[in-house]
Amino acid sequence: MDDLAQAKQGARAAWSAGDFTRFAEMIGSSRGRLLGLLGIGPGDEVLDVGSGYGNLAIEAAATGASVTGVDIAPGMVAMARRAAQVAGSPALFEEGDAEDLAAETGSVDVVMSSFACMFAPRHAVTAGELARVLRPGGRMGVLAWTPDSDIAQFIRVTVPHLPPPPSSAQPPLLWGDEDHVRGIFAGTGLELSFARDTVTFPTMPAQEIIEVHLREFGPLVAARAMLEPQGRWQALVDDVSAFFRSKSGADGSVTFTSDYVIVLGRAPG
């Protein structure tokens, strides 16, 4: 198995671990912003890339659109299907890779991704796939954390403790850099525009937010299984704890905010 295939196998395990329900609820405002900008409605064929627990796809399907969500993690797909069943939503969910989408060329009106396709290793390959599946005049919307956001700082805290990415991979936070995004979509024909916004997470005591991340955030749950037998888990715990405590106020609580960019695109025709 080459390093790229091994990294994708690790991603499947990491994003299938933990419980993202709470985190998905916390970023609900960003989903509403994206759906409003894309103007999804009845008759639209929509593909949600990196659909996670299915929240964005289910909300899009509530407009009358026909929505399919794809995710590399089988655990995420299973959770999304259960969520759709509970909600009575017609949204469909399948396993899929952002770098190799099963959708036919020119088959969807809208392709979207909420803080997901940014984690696919090869950015230009992913950008090409997002553009490929759009019909003439189709719309794209991608949410990505900005490189200077609080979430970006959190990612940088955890990365040194995890296996190195494959040599072909680019840092996910580059999706929050407008110049980089223009570069990876160069030649696709998409006309790009950008917007920015901020997610404000619920205020909670520092110790609680630390415990929530260590217990429920999938990549950390998966990291524990790998690092604890090596005696390296506590070092990650210490760094995560120090990060959140550095964000706490005088009362010991953390009000966490994070900026994100909305990448919008329209296919020619």
Image: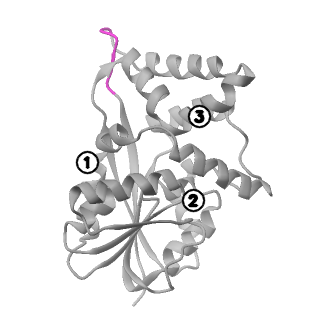
Task: Provide residue 132's location: percent of width, then percent of height.
Answer: 52, 80
Q: Is tag 1's residue or tag 2's residue first in the polypeptide sequence?
A: 1
Q: Is tag 3's residue or tag 2's residue first in the polypeptide sequence?
A: 3
In the depicted structure, whether residue 182 falls above or below residue 216: below
Q: Residue lying farthest right? A: 2
Q: Residue at 51%, 32% (x, y): give it.
A: 154
Residue 156 - label: 3
In the depicted structure, whether residue 240 falls above or below residue 3: above
Q: Residue at 47%, 37% (x, y): give it.
A: 18
The image quarter in which residue 134 lies: bottom left
Q: Does the stretch in magenta take in 59?
A: no
Q: Which residue is mark 1?
A: 29
Task: Provide residue 243's location: percent of width, then percent of height.
Answer: 50, 21
Which residue type carries mark 2? Answer: His
Q: Secondary structure at mark 3?
A: helix
Which residue type carries mark 1? Answer: Ser
The image quarter in which residue 127 lies: bottom right
Is residue 175 visible in the rendered image? The answer is no
In the depicted structure, whether residue 62 falls above or below residue 172: below
